[in-house]
Amino acid sequence: MTDTATRATLDLDGRRLSYLDFGGTGRPLIALHGHLSEGATFAPLAQALGPSWRVIAPDQRGQGESDRVADYSREGYLADMRALFDHMGLDRAVLLGHSLGAINSYQFAARHPERVSALINAEGPVALGLDGTNPFGFLLNLPYEAPTRDALIESAGPAAPYFSDRLRQNPDGSWRLPFHPQDMYQSEEQVHGDHWDDWTATTCPALLLRATKGVIAAEQATAMVERRPGTRLVELDADHSIPTSVPNEFADAVRAFLATL
């Protein structure tokens, strides 16, 4: 694996889907980030897994370097994944996802089981938002752009530290967030639901990574393992953002699971 990733672009009918390819000749692993994040989140993991694994990490639609879209439906995300598989010439790969990316991963596997050799679900629930609440309501108060970087950080208030190091500069010199707040609110709305049928649809080896201070209740995690053959559970003492909050422990758990394949 190379020390730095190569950024490339997949053109989807004029829409840009950007991805990082960490290279090497190892087995392919596609890593999908969660909301308010991007593929570069997995750079430490890619380094930890090399050279046995070639990590490919897209910026999912509307985030990072990938273009915004009007559609943040479940099928829209899964169509992007299929296009990436085809573009990379991958018949099969391991799918790893965090949060939104985890749900995308196991739903893609449910529809295309022949293309997924194993699943790694980091903090991706199978039932969420059933009470009708959207935790991203705070996003609707965030500005998308500002004339200067400092102005954008100031207007973002307490939320600024979560993405101040990933702001983008526009061609006219103004600055913007690496996602549109309304897009992410809409995306969160459409990821809500009861996804048990998708989670239990496949039997490939799977790792469920649960953060003790995350979003998957202990009871749900236990049921996810019991109801899906071939699934093992690892719990990490961390918050929901385990790829970044405990990167070493996250990489160790992933590497140990991959060694069993």
Image: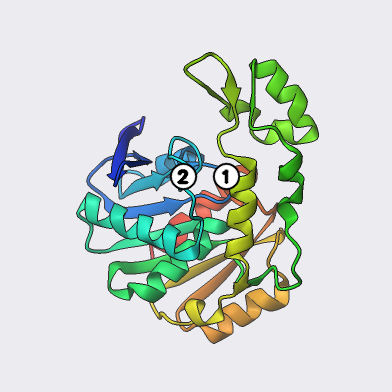
Q: How crowded is mark 2: few (under 14 residues within 10 Å), some or many (20 or more)?
A: many
Instruction: Give the residue at mark 2.
Output: 45
Instruction: Tell me the CA gap for discs 2 and 1.
Output: 7 Å
Q: Position of residue 170 (x, y in %)?
A: 51, 21
Q: Quadrant of residue 82?
A: bottom left
Image-quadrant location for residue 6: top left
The residue drawn where x is 61% and y is 27% is: 165
Q: Residue furthest right?
A: 158
Above or below 199: residue 174: above
**Residue displayed at 29% across by 47% down:** 13
| Residue 196 image label | none
Q: Residue 55 location in percent, x, y?
A: 36, 47
Residues tagged 2 and 1 counted as in contact (Cβ below 8 A): yes
How is the structure coloured here? rainbow
Give the SS element for disc 2. helix
The kind of residue on which mark 2 rests is: Leu
Left or right? Give the position of 217 relative to 205.
Answer: right
* Residue 198, image x, y percentages: 48, 77
As rendered, which of 215 and 159 lies closer to the eye? 159
- The amino acid beneath tag 1 is Pro
Q: Is mark 1 on a helix, strand or loop?
A: helix
- What's the residue at 40%, 62% (across, down)? 78
Q: In this view, does 129 lie above or below 174?
A: below
User: According to the image, label 1 marks what residue?
Assistant: 247
The answer to whether residue 129 shows anywhere in this view is yes
| In this view, 259 is above or below 223 | above
Q: Depth check: give the residue in front, 147 or 168.
A: 147
Left or right of 48, for residue 14: left
Q: Where is residue 200 in the image (x, y as percent from the top left)?
A: 49, 82
